[in-house]
Amino acid sequence: MSTARELVTASAGTPAYDIVRAAYVELQVNDLAAAEHFYVELLGMVVAERSSGALYLRGWEERLHHSLVLRRGPIPAAARLGFRVRREEDLDLLASDLGQRGLRPAWTRAADPGVGRVLHVSDPFGYPLEFFHDMAHAETQLQRFDLHRGAPLLRLDHFNLHTPDLVSAFQFWAGLGFRCSEYISTDGQDERLTGAWLLRKPNVHDVALTAGRGPRLHHTGFWVGEPAGVLRACDQLAAAGHPHAIERGPGRHGVSNAFFVYLRDPEGHRIELYSCDYYTGDPDHEPLRWSVNDVRCRSFWGTRAPDSWYEESSRVLGSDGAPVPIHDADVDERSQRTEVMA
Amino acid sequence: MSTARELVTASAGTPAYDIVRAAYVELQVNDLAAAEHFYVELLGMVVAERSSGALYLRGWEERLHHSLVLRRGPIPAAARLGFRVRREEDLDLLASDLGQRGLRPAWTRAADPGVGRVLHVSDPFGYPLEFFHDMAHAETQLQRFDLHRGAPLLRLDHFNLHTPDLVSAFQFWAGLGFRCSEYISTDGQDERLTGAWLLRKPNVHDVALTAGRGPRLHHTGFWVGEPAGVLRACDQLAAAGHPHAIERGPGRHGVSNAFFVYLRDPEGHRIELYSCDYYTGDPDHEPLRWSVNDVRCRSFWGTRAPDSWYEESSRVLGSDGAPVPIHDADVDERSQRTEVMA
Amino acid sequence: MSTARELVTASAGTPAYDIVRAAYVELQVNDLAAAEHFYVELLGMVVAERSSGALYLRGWEERLHHSLVLRRGPIPAAARLGFRVRREEDLDLLASDLGQRGLRPAWTRAADPGVGRVLHVSDPFGYPLEFFHDMAHAETQLQRFDLHRGAPLLRLDHFNLHTPDLVSAFQFWAGLGFRCSEYISTDGQDERLTGAWLLRKPNVHDVALTAGRGPRLHHTGFWVGEPAGVLRACDQLAAAGHPHAIERGPGRHGVSNAFFVYLRDPEGHRIELYSCDYYTGDPDHEPLRWSVNDVRCRSFWGTRAPDSWYEESSRVLGSDGAPVPIHDADVDERSQRTEVMA
Amino acid sequence: MSTARELVTASAGTPAYDIVRAAYVELQVNDLAAAEHFYVELLGMVVAERSSGALYLRGWEERLHHSLVLRRGPIPAAARLGFRVRREEDLDLLASDLGQRGLRPAWTRAADPGVGRVLHVSDPFGYPLEFFHDMAHAETQLQRFDLHRGAPLLRLDHFNLHTPDLVSAFQFWAGLGFRCSEYISTDGQDERLTGAWLLRKPNVHDVALTAGRGPRLHHTGFWVGEPAGVLRACDQLAAAGHPHAIERGPGRHGVSNAFFVYLRDPEGHRIELYSCDYYTGDPDHEPLRWSVNDVRCRSFWGTRAPDSWYEESSRVLGSDGAPVPIHDADVDERSQRTEVMA
């Protein structure tokens, strides 16, 4: 079995298809009105389209139709994680490759407004992944500062997956061509990964893997332009009577250098407002390692993340629409630490 | 005749009354709806009260009823500059003192909602000053971040007067108990004042005097919390289609250290968004001198102020409601400079 | 016995002397070199003067000789809390008044460089207070941005006292002419104060009282210009290998609206970097009440303060140089809360 | 002849080689010590290596050996504009392609420390371009906040070329695979390009083309993390006695949305501190058009750029080391405008 270092420095796969970036997420919610209030009224996302049971939203910068789908359903859950591919034919290449890996990709009917062919697959760990190329364009509102609120949320940046099978998951994503920018591992002989950040677009990540009970969606990250926006979002949430939505931060990550805050929506889905990471597009960009014992790895300022941040996540839905069974991870980052954090 | 240095370092008067601070301004406008759009829709000030011909506004932090009165009138002009005194009886002491100076103070009928006795006087240069103690309280909205827009404007901070009689004006205000925090003067034997900053509340100023054609109101300064707010206000104004409202800045003042921007309202009244000055409350606080030849005095980054900033100002109204005649200053700060600025 | 509301809304005393503001603190430390590294190298304070056993520092804006004295001594403790008075003769008036209150004020030999007469007194609770008027002037370095580090610390703003006798302490300070800007109290019939903010200079406070084991100095607050500076200080501390110095925050206070962070120096003395509070100089400024049950009162974003913040403080020294005995408070803010905070 | 719109929306070329990004610039200076003072002492760039006649610098984030070379020479000039390619063999493909375009690419001896093969070519307009793949790695100092100064400059972002042949230059760069993100053009029937922004890495640009006398290098852009850093850099430059280095801004660009400032080094080379642009990596990302008559295109807040910004630029050196002859452009953005800007 390879060490963490061997794993993260192995070359990523070079498949024939080209996955561009993380692009959309569908969150299932019980109370669609409450979710709309949170994402539209409080966080100020742009409404792209409404249907009877769903709401399509996007960030202020985005030029595709939507990046967040809120859909009414029986339990809070993450229903779909969408990735954009470069060319329409990449979808066929992906379908073939995923089939050869023993998975069962399927073309979904175009249920989403403005979206072309969608390839859906349950990955080996149960995550509901989707791939698409074609989506209707929208006008960017990046410079409609007069309409912005809070942060504002500019664009979807990444998914963070709570996974008990971190090494296998890493290898799966590397096979799809994802490179590693940073990772956290234990010290000593038996070095073990507890977190990894994987990318297609050239910033720190499109997908992060966090060791923990899963498969679950830990959070969806949205890019904001600067730290001042993150602070303003917190001020506005608290002023509007929703301080409880702020779970962790604002703070600076050691990993990624991001200035961040984690929010919980009314049904517990976790959102990260994320800014200030860096360029990773050079072909020989090397992964940075953080020791679990460096108090600065998760929070550069040494602040302890609350237990809820380590323990709670959104269940993911299988192809049958039922939540995928979860199991524990064999490593807990918190128990690896020799030092107590503030 | 005293030199500038002797003037600014002379002790301020210690009158029996206590003027607390600059408190309100009335701006006369032709188009009240356009003014409301600018101050309320674009800049986000809080509406305190409406009457048929006037609009009463305040900043987000303020706890008195209003700090800005917009009143419909034949020409754009500054109608009244209001100062608060500590005790009701200070008004009587002031009335007596002003009378002894040969001025004609008068009690105005309480035309403003929520305001008690008001002492009105045309000062020796023609400025329409008012003094009051009693005004209705309002709830601060400092922490209603969810409702804030742009900067936001927190509170009225100061008046800047365009005056041809800078030395005499300085002596008049010193007589009312105003101390000097900073001044600009020419170099060489015949040192001449071209600007002075005078205070009662312990920050850089309540009243600034700028050498120039007058009597006119150069601008009214409103405090904002931080530079990021000043930038956001500019972004919002431009996004809303009003980039022309931005006359000068954003930038850093040498004098006062303020991070600022100057805006022009639809009828040309000038507003400063002002942040980051400093504490001046110690009894032996000494004035800072800037040479007119230090390119950093008006703009710390050496940026040239546009000519409009030196030349244009709001006419002031006399007791008869007609604009007070104006005359040129005998010194022009720009012509004193030996160095050309960017 | 008066209720909290009666207490905070009673008029402050109007003594004949005029205390201007909180002005300096002396912190006793075991390891003076370590303290110098923290305050000078890491936080970037300006060195005013060194002596064999003491170091005199000031903030970047300050125009008096020093605001922080670090002195080598057997245990970490707060040795003196200094306040400036307006006129030299105020010291005599104070000496007389304090004597009439049964205290034993004494003139200290001018042990501090650049300082004139100093009146020292142990207040009724054991706090070592000092009053002075005369101190040597220094040139402000407010605009020496090229030399600034981190925040930077601009000026001493306030002291926060951990006191078991909150009502009595409130009355003592009110007697010296301190007004109340904000307070926290319990809900229900038996309303009890758990915190109070008291001022002479017109921002939120010069002295805050926090219910808890005491007499101890909870922290000394230093003003910084804007939230971005607070974040930068944290980034620099962590980058320099001192994330443990960051105890709480950065965050927004509900009380005072301040954007803050709490640091602990190498011997545990607590420092607050404090920005963004507001003007309180109007004579009829009314105290704001916060319920202990409003999760936003201590941290506007609902973040729980760590227990260390409630429990740990610096012992204060008596006139004999020995630590003053401490006792518990009869109210603990944390136990009053009905709601659990994040 | 194609219209501006046809030009910018035509698909970029899809050459066999892959240019990753703009990577380094060599600026020739008369006074190397003065240049070092500016870039290292004032702007805080990291020194990678010194040689007798040259200084190699990089930004705080960068992981390659250098991005800025300062070399002593007879006149201030831009000597080389370097681009990184994805694979070593891309250099051979490029050499072949450039030869087929009638240019004379040549392998330079590895004159730069840490750099492998370099392909040098004078492009059809006289710009001295270089391409490389191999450069020694360096440790990022992104999170050494304790050592940062001013902005700080994180990484080289782009070149802006002053060119009289804007359409031809656009077509040349499009042929190398550069896509267009934004452009400025005249109104009316005869639409003419006056500026274009072209990219390989997925933000707004690696190369911008500005209509004007050329070939000259208008400026080199360096990425900074947030607007607060741009302001801090200005404050530090002015405080250190170099306000004249600030030529234009700080401000917000309409094009690119960047928050920026333009600096001039001691010999007049122009540097942009650049932040806040956006993601352009989607394959169907469409160019945004700005009319020259929109006062917000160059400065979103409507601020007029100084004439020096339109007129002055760095001469570029030919293969013989002599400055390439320059000629005027046939369009001047300023004269196209119908509206006067502040």
Image: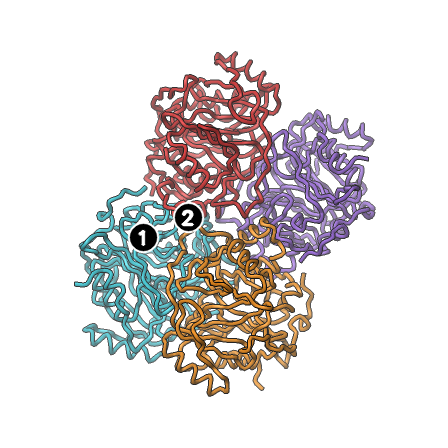
Chain colours: A red, B orange, C cyan, D purple
Image quadrant where residue D158 sits = top right
- Residue B303 visible in the picture: yes
Element at label 1: loop
Side of A18 where B81 appears, left or right: left
Q: Residue at x 70, y 54 (%)?
A: D31
Q: Which residue is mark 1?
A: C268
Side of D258 where A258 appears, left or right: left
**In the rendered structure, the residue with mark 1 lies on which chain?**
C
Side of C291 where D72 appears, left or right: right
- Residue B184 visible in the picture: no
Element at label 2: helix
Q: Quadrant of the N terminus of chain C?
A: bottom left
Residue B243 drawn at (x, y percent): 62, 53
**In the rendered structure, the residue with mark 2 lies on which chain?**
A
Q: Which residue is mark 2?
A: A235
Residue C258 drawn at (x, y percent): 39, 55
Say which mark, if any, is on residue B171. Answer: none
Name the residue nearer the viewer: D331 or A303.
D331
Q: Quadrant of the C terminus of chain C?
A: top left
- Whether discs 2 and 1 lie on one chain: the answer is no
Query: Around disc 1, counting alpha carbons within 10 Å, would you say few (fewer than 14), some (14 to 19), or many (20 or more)?
Result: some
Q: Residue at x 47, y 35 (%)?
A: A221
Q: Amino acid at mark 2?
A: Asp
Marks 2 & 1, CB-CB < 8 Å contact: no
Residue A101 drawn at (x, y percent): 50, 13
